[in-house]
Image (cartoon, grey):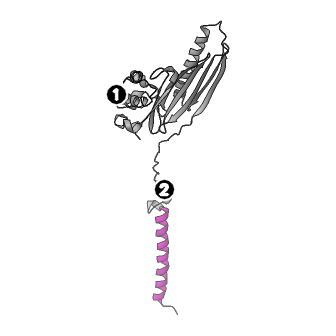
Amino acid sequence: MRTKDSSNKGLFFILFIVFVIVVFCFYNQGWFGFGKNNAEQPKTEEKKIETPEVKNYEVKMEKINEKASGASIDAEYPSFGNGVIDGNIKTVINAKIKDFKDSLSSSPDIDNTDQFLNISYVSSKHSREVFSIKFDVVYGGGIHPIEDVECRTYNLDNSKEIKLSDVFKENSSYLNKISELVYAELIKDKNVDPSWAKQGTSPKEENFKNFILEEKDMVFYFAPGIVASNSSGIREVRIPLSSLKMFLNSLFVN
């Protein structure tokens, strides 16, 4: 036979279990604002770290093949997928073609079938965004075709052409240094007249406008007759960028 005391203990135990269940529900479900309601907790937004896009550029070849007054025109030039730079390059090519056509129209009665204009190019890469192009231009016809060279360097990230002065620190004596180094390289060739080379490499911006930038070198080009005789053709002088380091702008220091 159960005693009154044992019955009270049983009842107390049941009430205790009910109390624990009610408190648990209140806390987890947030009833009447008590405890926490997981469904209503503010979500912590994940902070997104934006990484700037780094574009790698590809060089594609474009071509022009046409006839003009019986003469042939064949031109190859690069495109980079940058509208401003590609437009600048096309302007260079169109100017060469126009000059050639104008020369043909100046003598309309002459048979031009042996005349031609050929433009080819090589491109070089200094860094991810800095590219150079060297255009080789040949005006044909007769016994001795005429050779010419023209160079362009571009920063494709900001769509700007890079001039010689942009490569070097402002107010530095970079022209004197370039003049000294290029002249020294030219006269290593015994067929080069030192006085001719000296005149063509005097420290003037115009004398060194045709350059390209490679990863480690700066290469200068001179059309026939500038630093040596016409018969010697286009002259190339390669100068390590390390030799110009103290004059270079930071973008061009490797």
**Image quarter in which the C terminus is found:** top left
Asked if residue 19 is among those painted magenta in the image, a careful observer would answer yes
Between disc 1 and disc 2, the foreground one is 1
Q: Which mark is residue 157?
A: none
Q: Who is closer to the viewer here, 145 or 90? A: 145
Residue 172 x %, y %: 32, 30
Q: Residue 83 placed where, x, y %?
A: 54, 28
The reply to whether the magenta stretch includes residue 5 is yes
Q: Mark 1 highlights which residue? A: 176
Q: Who's the residue at 48% across and 80% down the image?
A: 13
Judge whether residue 175 can be spotted in this image. Answer: yes
Q: Residues within 10 Å of mark 1 (few under 14, many from 20)?
A: few
Image: 250 above or below 208:
below
Residue at 66% across / 16% down in the picture?
114
| Residue type, mark 2 in image | Glu
Q: Residue at label 2?
A: 40
Outermost residue toward the top?
A: 109
- Give neighbour class at mark 2: few <14, some 14-19, many 20+ (Cα, 10 Å): few
> In this rendering, does residue 159 appear at all?
no
Residue that protrudes farthest toward the front in the picture:
190
Q: Amino acid at mark 1?
A: Asn
- Where disc 2 sits, the SS reads helix
Numbered range of the magenta stretch: 1-29
Whether tag 1 and tag 2 are in contact, CB under 8 A, the answer is no
Q: Main secondary structure of the magenta part?
A: helix
**Residue 15 horizontal side relative to residue 118, left or right:** left
Where residue 173 sits, quadrant-wise, is: top left
The location of residue 223, given as percent across then percent down, is 49, 23
70 or 163, which is in the foreground? Answer: 70
Work out whether 207 lies above or below 9.
Answer: above
Q: Tell me the element at label 1.
A: helix
Q: Earlier in the sequence, mark 1 or mark 2?
A: 2
